[in-house]
Image: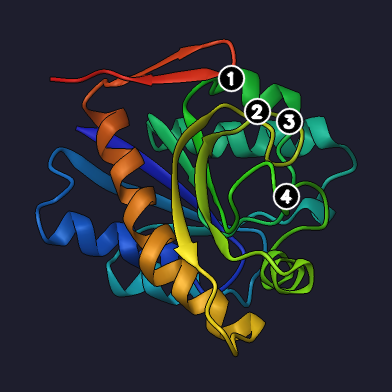
C-alpha cells in the first residue's frame, strides 16, 4: 500500500481528483493518509474531513527558518509513514532538507507547460493570465518531481490544452484543470505506485510493461 501525503493551500480540486480516482479503483494500492495545509482557511481541509483523512495546518510563518519548517513537515510525514508526497496547489516552498529526505518521492502539478509560465510568483491564476497576455495557442499542465527551486524538478508528464478565442484567465484555468491537471496528476501517482518512474538526472523514463 502506498501512503500518500497531500499538501495544499487552497480549494483542493486536485486533492479531490486524487480521492475520486482512489474511490473509482483507478489507483489501486494507494491511499491518502494525511492532508497538510499551509493555510487554516483552505477548503481542501474540509474535503479531507469529509473522507475522514487526518488533516493538519502547518504554516511557514510559524517557524523561524526554512530548516525548522522542513523538520516539522518531515516529522509529520514520517509519523504517517508517507511514501509519496503530492503538492496539490501548495504555495509554500519546500527546502533542501525536505527534498533530500523525500528525494524523487515528492511530485507537484503546475498549470502550464514547463518551462513556460513557471517559477517564483507563477501560481494560481497567474500562469493563465500570462499565457493569455503572451498570446499562446496552447497551454496545459505539468507534473514533475520537486526540487528546492520552484518548478525546477524533472518532468514526469505534460498534457497540452488549447487556448480558445474569448478565454478569460478563469475559463482557461478551469479547462486546464479539467482537461489536464485532474488527469495527469492521478496518472503520475499511479506510475509512481507501480514503480514505473526511473529518474536519471533531469530525465524521467516511464518503464513500459
Assign a secondary structure to mark 2: helix
Measure how far apart labels 3 and 4 are at the Cα level.
Answer: 14 Å
Q: Nearer the viewer, mark 3 or mark 4?
A: 4
Measure how far apart labels 1 and 4 are at the Cα level.
Answer: 24 Å
- Mark 2 is surrounded, within 10 Å at the Cα level, by few (under 14), some (14 to 19) or many (20 or more) other residues, namely many
Q: Is residue 119 above or below residue 38?
A: above
Q: Nearer the viewer, mark 4 or mark 2?
A: 4
Instruction: Name which residue lies at 69% across and 33% down.
Output: 152
Which numbered tag is attached to residue 148?
Answer: 3
Provide residue 49's location: percent of width, then percent of height.
Answer: 37, 71
Provide residue 113's location: percent of width, then percent of height.
Answer: 58, 49
Instruction: Name which residue lies at 12% across and 42% down.
Output: 28
Q: Closer to the N terminus: mark 2 or mark 3?
A: 2
Assign a secondary structure to mark 1: helix
Q: Are marks 3 and 4 in contact (CB under 8 Å)?
A: no
> Which residue matches tag 4?
118
- Mark 1 is surrounded, within 10 Å at the Cα level, by few (under 14), some (14 to 19) or many (20 or more) other residues, namely few
Provide residue 124's location: percent of width, then percent of height.
Answer: 67, 68
Q: Considering the image in quadrants, where does the C terminus appear?
A: top left
> Which residue matches tag 2?
98
Q: Nearer the viewer, mark 2 or mark 3?
A: 3
Q: Considering the image in quadrants, where does the N terminus appear?
A: top left
Amino acid at each position: 500500500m502506498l501512503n500518500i501525503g497531500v499538501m495544499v493551500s487552497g480549494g483542493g480540486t486536485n486533492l479531490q481528483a486524487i480521492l475520486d480516482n482512489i474511490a473509482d479503483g483507478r489507483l489501486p494500492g494507494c491511499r491518502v493518509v494525511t492532508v497538510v495545509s499551509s493555510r487554516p482557511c483552505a477548503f481542501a481541509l474540509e474535503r479531507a474531513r469529509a473522507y475522514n483523512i487526518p488533516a493538519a495546518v502547518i504554516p511557514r510563518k510559524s517557524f523561524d527558518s526554512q530548516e525548522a519548517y522542513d523538520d516539522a513537515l518531515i516529522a509529520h510525514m514520517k509519523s504517517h509513514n508517507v511514501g509519496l508526497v503530492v503538492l496539490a496547489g501548495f504555495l509554500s516552498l519546500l527546502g533542501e532538507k525536505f527534498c533530500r529526505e523525500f528525494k524523487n518521492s515528492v511530485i507537484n502539478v503546475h498549470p502550464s507547460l514547463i518551462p513556460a509560465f513557471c517559477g517564483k510568483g507563477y501560481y494560481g491564476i497567474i500562469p493563465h493570465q500570462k499565457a493569455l497576455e503572451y498570446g499562446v495557442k496552447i497551454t496545459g499542465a505539468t507534473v514533475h518531481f520537486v526540487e528546492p527551486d520552484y518548478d525546477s524538478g524533472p518532468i514526469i508528464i505534460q498534457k497540452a490544452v488549447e487556448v480558445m478565442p474569448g478565454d478569460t484567465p478563469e475559463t482557461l484555468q478551469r479547462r486546464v484543470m479539467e482537461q489536464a491537471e485532474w488527469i495527469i496528476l492521478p496518472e503520475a501517482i499511479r506510475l509512481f505506485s507501480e514503480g514505473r518512474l526511473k529518474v536519471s538526472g533531469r530525465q524521467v523514463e516511464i518503464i513500459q510493461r
